[in-house]
Amino acid sequence: MSTHKTRLAIFCSGSGSNFQAIFRALKKKQLNAEIVLCLSNRVECGAMEFARLNAIATVHLTEKQFDSLDDFAAAMLGSLTEQRIDIIVLAGYMRKVPDAVVTAFQDRIINIHPALLPKFGGEGMYGIYVHAAVLEAGETESGATVHLVNEEYDKGRILMQRHVPVLPDDTPETLAERVLACEHILYPDALEKILAEQQS
Ligand code: GAR
């Protein structure tokens, strides 16, 4: 068994509740990993605030700060290299990870999606839009999926899923709340499994 503590970067865009669930689970489950970087396209958001409060390094990066996507990807890779990141954890990151970063971190980027992929994934399917589409389709169950990230939106290999019921009087908001609560269990569980495989 490796003694190296796996170094995680969390990418977020919003409230960061999955980030917080993972942060707590790392301690509770005594996992051999630590969150050493929070990268966000938003300088002010719940996730960045939580990182600052917990003395986790933060990086604010958006495409708009650069002349080209290549420069943006190079800056992102620079931050990841500087922090010697092993695994990137996307937790409510509402941007596409540049292809150069996906290539450099092949099979080392994971994402959580708020539906049962391969259904209800792809470009434009994020946040509340996913839950609205699930209700529109008349599904009787939904859930969350943790998957590897490749160059295509939500198409990487599925690692773990967890199901929740869709209730007759659900709105996108009530369904979102139920799915988010299930994500907070699923993401730490999936991470635990990945770390066990990687460190064995
Ligand atoms: C989560 O429901 C996550 O699955 C979703 O955004 C929310 C972020 O919440 N991600 C996507 O839709 C990505 N396609 P959080 O910031 O509280 O973790």
Image (cartoon, helix red, strand yellow):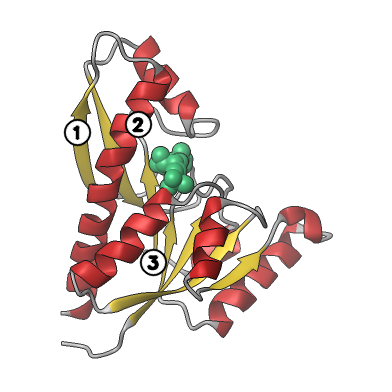
Alpha carbon separation for disc pair 2 and 3 = 28 Å
Locate residue 174: give its quadrant: top left
> Could you tell me if the residues under marks 3 and 1 are in contact, i.e. CB atoms within 8 Å?
no
Q: Of the residues under marks 3 and 1, which one precedes in the sequence?
A: 3
Q: Can you identify the residue that label 2 sits on?
A: 177
Residue 22: quadrant of the picture: bottom left
**Does mark 2's beta carbon lie closer than 8 Å to ligand 1?**
no
Q: Do the residues under discs 2 and 1 have CB atoms within 8 angstroms? A: no
- The mark nearer the N terminus, 2 or 3, is 3
Q: Quadrant of the N terminus?
A: bottom left
Could you say which disc has been placed on residue 163 in the image? Answer: 1
Q: What residue does disc 3 label? A: 108
Mark 2 / mark 1, whichever is N-terminal? 1
Q: Which quadrant, please, contains the C terminus?
A: bottom left
**Disc 2 residue type (three-letter):** Glu
* Picture coordinates of residue 72, whole percent (x, y): 71, 63
Q: With 179 as the anchor, is 129 left or right in this view? A: right
Q: Residues within 10 Å of mark 3 (few under 14, many from 20)?
A: some
- Are the two marked residues, 2 and 3, in contact with CB atoms closer than 8 angstroms? no
> Which is in the foreground here, disc 3 or disc 1?
1
Residue 31 image position (x, y, % from top left): 22, 74
